[in-house]
Each structure stands twice: as C-alpha cells, then as structure tokens.
Amino acid sequence: MRRIILIAALLFAQPAKAEEEDDRKVVYKQKTEIDFEGLNVDAALVKPAGSLVLERKKASFNPLIKLRSNFNEEIDKSTDEIK
C-alpha cells in the first residue's frame, strides 16, 4: 500500500511554477546623504572601577629534574670505552 501511494505521489507531483518575472528594473540612488546636524549626543567618559595590575608574578614550579653541572665521572668512563 505504501508503495502505491509513493508511486502515485511521484507520478502526479508537479514542480512549483514561479511567477513570471516582470521587466521592471530597480534603480538605486548614486549617493545617499545622512544629516546628523539635528542629532544631539550626550556622553561621559567612564573609567573602570578598581585598579589595573601591570606586572604579573612569575609562576614558580618545583623542579622535577635535577640539573647537574659536574659530569667528570661519566666523561672518564667514556674514554675507557673508546680504547
């Protein structure tokens, strides 16, 4: 039953016809002038509340790797491996 309804809908479906376009053309002005003379604007300078922090404190982390400055023992061992 569904197939019959689907086939009938597809066979009798007609595309929507758009209205035929008129030969009217839209004409826009070359220049638009806006007059702000009659407009009064009242404004005030508002500063933010609170203080502004300019400098940030550097974050300190616990070092997970210990940096060594003396590798003399490893250098002596490496020369033994070369010979």
Image (tube, helix red, strand yellow):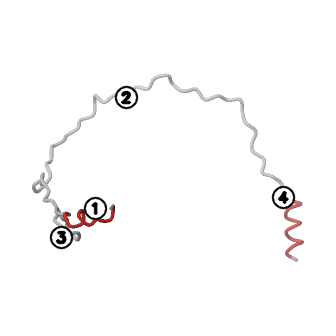
x then y, percent, for residue 44: 15, 43
Residue type (three-letter) at the residue carrying disc 4: Ala
Residue type (three-letter) at the residue carrying disc 3: Asn
Of labels 4 and 3, the one closer to you: 3
CB atoms at circles 3 and 1 under 8 Å apart?
Answer: no
Q: Identify the secondary structure beneath mark 4.
A: loop
Residue 11 as seen in the image, left or right of residue 37: right
Residue type (three-letter) at the residue carrying disc 1: Thr
Of labels 3 and 2, the one closer to you: 3
Q: Residue at the spot x=28%, y=61% of the render?
A: 79
x then y, percent, for residue 33: 40, 25
Residue 76 as seen in the image, left or right of residue 4: left
The residue at which mark 1 appears reads as 79
Q: Earlier in the sequence, mark 3 or mark 1?
A: 3
| 30 vs 71: above or below | above
The residue at which mark 3 appears reads as 62
Q: Identify the secondary structure beneath mark 3.
A: loop
Q: Quadrant of residue 64?
A: bottom left
Q: Nearer the viewer, residue 20 or 57?
A: 57
Gap in angstroms between the C-alphas marked 4 and 2: 52 Å
Residue 69 as seen in the image, left or right of residue 24: left
Residue type (three-letter) at the residue carrying disc 2: Ile
Q: Residue furthest left?
A: 51
Of labels 4 and 1, the one closer to you: 1
Q: Earlier in the sequence, mark 4 or mark 2?
A: 4
x then y, percent, for residue 6: 85, 68
Q: Earlier in the sequence, mark 4 or mark 3?
A: 4
